[in-house]
Amino acid sequence: MKYAFGELVSDIAKPFAVGILIAGIITFFFPEDLTVWANDHRFVSMLIMLVAGIPMYVCATASTPIAAALILKGLNPGAALVFLLAGPATNAATINLVRTIFNTRTLVIYLSMIAVTSLAMGVGVDAVYEFMGIRASAVVGQAAEIVPAWIQIPAAALLAGLMGYNIWKNSRQCTSSVCTSGCAE
């Protein structure tokens, strides 16, 4: 219980809050006609998400709500998966570290394999959705219908309270040189 409601919440609180904030911005500012463009240019949208995800420092905790918001706006699920795979697997710090410790050739191989694997999985997911005739943007949010609102709202309030408390507690424990909170990847 101490780990689940303390340490684990502390580890995911900040990245999750950032992800929710970015997802809200995407939901508000991104155009509604993203669906038309993304469905007409599936592979290009995957490449854009790959280019966006690789240098961005976004952990899996933060990237999940971002991907959900993009799917809600009409992005194909394959492109969202590319973002979910490439973003947490790479970032500017990791890229620099791999190049410094190994060499540029190793970095190119590392990034190439992440790109190829992410794109292949994205194409596969889009193929499955197309084969099954599922529109991802129509399916997003349907899980909320399973749990009644009288449970959802207190649960959300409890999670927000736990996250706020743990962020506050960790900010008091952080010294100027070392802070143990952050994204636990």
Image: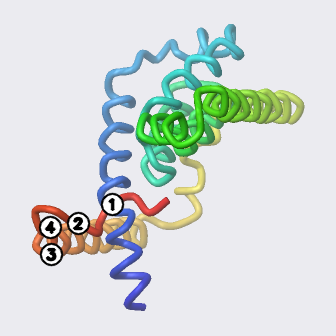
**Residue 75 is drawn in which quadrant?**
top right
The residue lying at 79 percent from left, 30 percent from top is 120
- Tag 3 residue: 173
Name the image quarter holding the N terminus. bottom left
- Residue found farthest to the bottom: 1
The residue lying at 66 percent from left, 35 percent from top is 110
Q: Is residue 110 rendered to the left or right of residue 53?
A: right
Kind of residue indicated by mark 4: Ser
Image mark for residue 131:
none
Q: Earlier in the sequence, mark 3 or mark 1?
A: 3
Q: CA distance from mark 4 to mark 3?
A: 5 Å
Q: Position of residue 119 (x, y in %)?
A: 73, 27
The residue lying at 39 percent from left, 63 percent from top is 12
Q: Earlier in the sequence, mark 4 or mark 1?
A: 4
| Badge 2 vs badge 1, beta-carbon distance below 8 Å | yes
Which element is circle 1 on?
A: loop
- Tag 4 residue: 171
Q: Earlier in the sequence, mark 4 or mark 2?
A: 4
- Tag 1 residue: 182
Within 10 Å of disc 3 (Cα), the crowding (few <14, some 14-19, many 20+) is few
| Badge 3 vs badge 1, beta-carbon distance below 8 Å | no
- Residue found farthest to the right: 131
- Say if 143 sits above or below 31 in the image: below
Q: Is residue 182 visible?
A: yes
| Badge 4 vs badge 3, beta-carbon distance below 8 Å | yes
Q: CA distance from mark 2 to mark 3?
A: 7 Å
- Tag 2 residue: 179
Q: Nearer the viewer, residue 47 or 28?
A: 47
Q: Position of residue 131 (x, y in %)?
A: 89, 31
Which element is circle 2 on?
A: loop
- Say if 97 sits above or below 76 in the image: below
Which element is circle 3 on?
A: helix
